[in-house]
Image: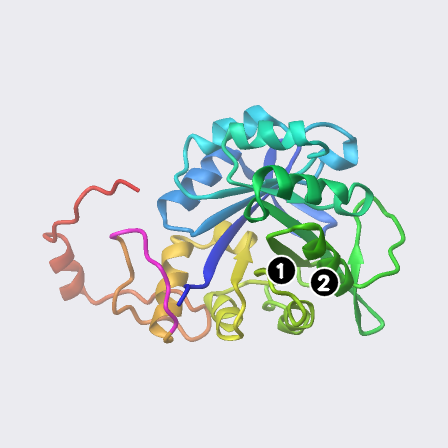
Amino acid sequence: MLKTRIIGVLIVKNNWVVQSINFAKFLPIGRLDVAVEYLNQWGIDEIVILDIDASREGRSPNFEMIKSASAFSQTPLSVGGGISSLSDMESMLRAGADKLIINSRLLTHSFLIEQGAKQFGNQCMIASIDAIKKENKYMAYNNQKMDLDFSAKELAIKAESLGAGEIFLNSIDRDGMKVGLDLKLGDEVRRDLSIPLILCGGVGKPSHLYEGINAGLDAVAAGNFFHFTEMSVIAAKQYISQNGCSIRFDSYARYSNANFDEISERPSRHNEDVLEKLRFEYIPEEII
C-alpha cells in the first residue's frame, strides 16, 4: 500500500519565499535555496515551489533560481509559475524540477497540460486549482481576476481529461488560517477523479495533516506550518505515526516515543535521565 505523501509548499514572491494569508497578505520568510535545504534535510516527501508573480507579470520562470535551489535537494521538486510553452517546461526540468505545475494558464492555455503530458508523461504534469467557497459551492478561482463560472471539481475533471497526472487543490478560505484542511472540498473534488489529489490550505498543527491522511487523501500539503515550527517535518511525521498511519521517515532523527502536548501538539520535553542518556548515544552522520 502506498504511503500518503506529506508535501511542503514554498510560495515565492519577488524571488523570496513568503507566508501567504488568504492569497492577499504576504509576509517574508527568506531565500528559496535555504527553505528547500531545510525541508530536504528534515525528510519532507516532496516540495512544491510556486512563483505567484510570474504569470501575473507575464514573464518566464526564474530558471536560475530553481537551478540554485535544486542543488540543495534530493527531494522531488514540483515547480510552477510562468510556464507558458514546451520550451519553458524543458528548461524547468533541466533546471532541476521533477514535475511541472500549471495554474492560471490551465484556464487560458489548457493545451499546455495536453502537450506536456505527451512530451514528458502524465506523471510530470500537475494541474493546480485554487478554490473559493461561494454560496456553499466550491468555485475555481483565478488570480488574474477573471470571473469564473465553473466549479473547482469541473476544472479538476477537465484537467484530468487533458492529461494531468495529479491535482494540487488549494483552499483560499483556509490559506494561512491554521484551522485545518477543508476535507469537504477535498472529498467533493476527488470523488470523480482517478488521479491523485493533493490538498492544501489551513494546516496549523500535526493533527490537521493526520486528519487528511485518515480521510484517504493521496497527499497532504502545508506551507506556513513548516516555516514556524521547529523540526516541524519530523515532529509532524512522528505524531502521525503514533496515531496509527504509515509514514515514511527519511532521517535518523525522530521524536521516538515522544509525548505530544495536547494543545500545541509539539513534543514535550523529556526528563533529565533521558536527556543525560542521549548525550552519549551515537547517531551516524546522515546523507540524504
Q: Is residue 163 magenta?
A: no
Q: Is residue 247 above or below residue 29?
A: below
Residue 277's x, y, as percent?
A: 11, 59
Horizontal relation, residue 242 to residue 124: left or right: left
Please tell me whether mark 2 sits on a helix, a strand or a loop: loop
- What x and y, as percent, mark residue 274? 16, 64
The amino acid type found where label 1 is placed reads Gly
Depth check, front residue: 111 or 38: 111
What residue is pinned by disc 1? Answer: 201
**Residue 247: in magenta span:** yes
In the image, is residue 161 above or below residue 245? Answer: above
Would residue 18 appear left or right of 146 to someone viewing this image? left
- Say if 154 sits above or below 142 in the image: below
Start and end of the magenta stretch? 245-252
Q: Quadrant of residue 105?
A: top right
Q: Residues within 10 Å of mark 1 (few under 14, many from 20)?
A: many
Check disc 2 and report the residue beneath it. Answer: 173
Pick the front one: 141 or 180: 141
1 and 2 marks in contact (CB < 8 Å):
yes
Tag 2 or tag 1, which sits nearer the N-term? Answer: 2
Q: Position of residue 21 (x, y in %)?
A: 67, 53
